[in-house]
Amino acid sequence: MIVKVLPRKGGSTRASARKLMAYLLGPGDLGGAEQGETGELGNRHTDPAVVASWDPIRTATWAQHCRTVAWSEPDAAWRALHTFAQGIGDETAAGARLEDTAQPRNLVWHTIMAAHPDDGQLTDAQWQPIAARLMHQTGLHPDDSDNPVRWVAVRHGPNAAGADHIHVMAILVRLDGTRASIHNDVFAAQGAARWAEQEHGLTPGRGRTSPADPAQGVRADRPASRSDIAAATKTGPPYPKPQGMDRPTWARVQQEGRNRMWTRQGRTRAAVLSAAARAISAQHLIALVEDQGYHVRLRYSHTNPGQVTGWSVVAPPDQRARSPKAFAGRTLGSDCTWPALIAHINARGLSDGLGIIHGQEGQAMIDRARMTAAGWGAGFIDQVIANDQALIDDGPDADPALAYWMRDVFWQVAWTLEQSRG
C-alpha cells in the first residue's frame, strides 16, 4: 500500500473543502489536474462513495445517499453528487472558527491511500477501519479524543493502474478553534499503511514510518538552477544516441540530461559518485574528488570539533560558468551526503571489491533485462558496466562521468516507462 499526503493549495478553508469534496464525488479529472492530483494514481472516478468520517451516523447517511444515486442517467447522477458533495464540504468545515485572522487560510488536509493492484478491490467495511487508523495514527482523531478534527473518506475503487484507493479530507481546525498539529504526518500515514497491510494481508509498501528510517530511492536531489539548465541545453548530450533506442525514449533521456545530469550540478554529482566508487577511506574520497578539479569543504560538529557532520563540494569555473559554486551534499542527492558516503565506503570494504553499478546492478542501475527493454543495446550496456569496473581497478581509461550519468539515466527512463504503463 502507498500513501500520499498532498500539498494544500491556495484559497479559503471552506472553499477548498467544497471544491475538493466536489472533485472526490465527481467524475474525476477528465481534462486537467485538480486539487493537487497529478495523475500518479489515476483520476477517472467510477461510482465514488463516502466510506468513513468523524461521525458514524453521518457516515451511514452519506454512504446510503451515494448508493442510491440513479446511474441510469449519468449526467444527472454526477450533478446530484456535486450538490451533495458541496453540502458535505460545508458541514465538514462548519463550526470551526475559520474567521479567526490568526489562522492560515487553507487548512484542508488531503491524503490518498492506495492498495497494490495485485491486492484486488477492498470492501467499504475494510476501508473504513483503515481510514480511521490513518486519523488515529496522525493524531488528528485519536480513539479517546472528544475534540477531533472533522474528516471524510471517499472510495473511488480501482484507478487506471488497477489500484483500489480512498481519499481522506480533514479540516485542521477543531470545533473549539484550536489547530491540529500535522507534525510528521507523512511518517504517521505510512505507519497506518503498514498496519493496514498486516491487518488485511496487503502487499507491503516502502514508505518510511519515522524520520530516523533511512531514505529510500536512488536519489533525492534538488532541481538545478535555470541558468545551469540553459547551459546544459545549449551544450547538448555528451554521448550519441544509443543504438536501438527509439526517438521518444531518447527525447526523455535528453530532457533528463538537460535538467539534471549534464548540468554543472549533475557533473559535480557524477564526480562525487565516481570518487565514492574507488575510495577506501574518507581521506581518499576527498583526494579523489579534488583530483577531478573540485574543492571540498568539511563541516564539523560544534560539540565534538573533530567530528565531520557534513560537507560541500565546490565546482570550479568552466566555459559555462565563470565563478566557482559550492553544492551541499544534500543538494547533490541523498546518496551524496557525508554520512551516506562514509557508510558506503565502510560497506564497500565488505563487498569483495565490487562497485556501485556492477555490484548493485539491480538497485542502482536497473537490471540488464529492463535496460534492454528501455532501448539500450547490449554493447552499450557492457560499455557502461566496463567503465564501472575500470573505476574499481583505477584504470587510466575509466570514464566516471559516463558510468554515473548513465546509471541515473537508466533509472530515470525505467521509472518513466513504468509510470506510462500505470
Image: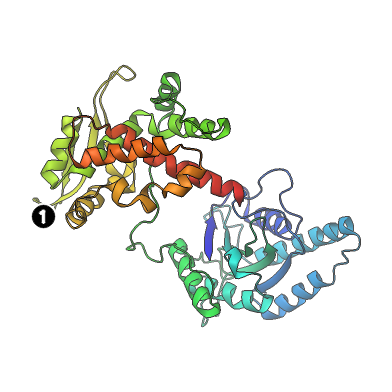
Left or right: residue 69 versus residue 20 is right
Measuring 39% from the left and 39% from the top, which residue is drawn there? Answer: 381
Q: Secondary structure at mark 1?
A: loop
The quarter of the picture where residue 174 lies is: bottom right
Of residues 18 and 313, the one nearer the viewer is 313
User: Total marks drawn?
Assistant: 1
Q: Residue furthest front?
A: 379
| Residue that sits furthest to the bottom in the current view | 144
Q: Is residue 266 above or below residue 23?
A: above
- Residue 238 visible in this rendered orientation of the protein: yes
In the rendered image, the vertical position of residue 389 relative to residue 63, given as above or below = above
Say which of 151 and 146 sits in front.
151
The residue depicted at 55 percent of the width and 78 percent of the height is: 200
Q: Residue furthest left?
A: 306
In this orientation, which residue lies closer to the viewer: 72 or 142?
72
230 lies above or below 194: above
Q: Is residue 10 visible?
A: no
Q: Quadrant of residue 57?
A: bottom right
Going 74% across and 47% down the picture, which residue do you hit?
30
Q: Quarter of the image holding residue 99?
A: bottom right
Three-letter code, disc 1: Asn
Residue 137, horizontal then vertical, whole percent? 48, 73
| Residue on which disc 1 sits | 304
Where residue 227 appears, x then y in whole percent? 41, 24
Residue 224 picture location, percent across and down: 40, 33
Residue 374, image x and y in percent?
A: 51, 42
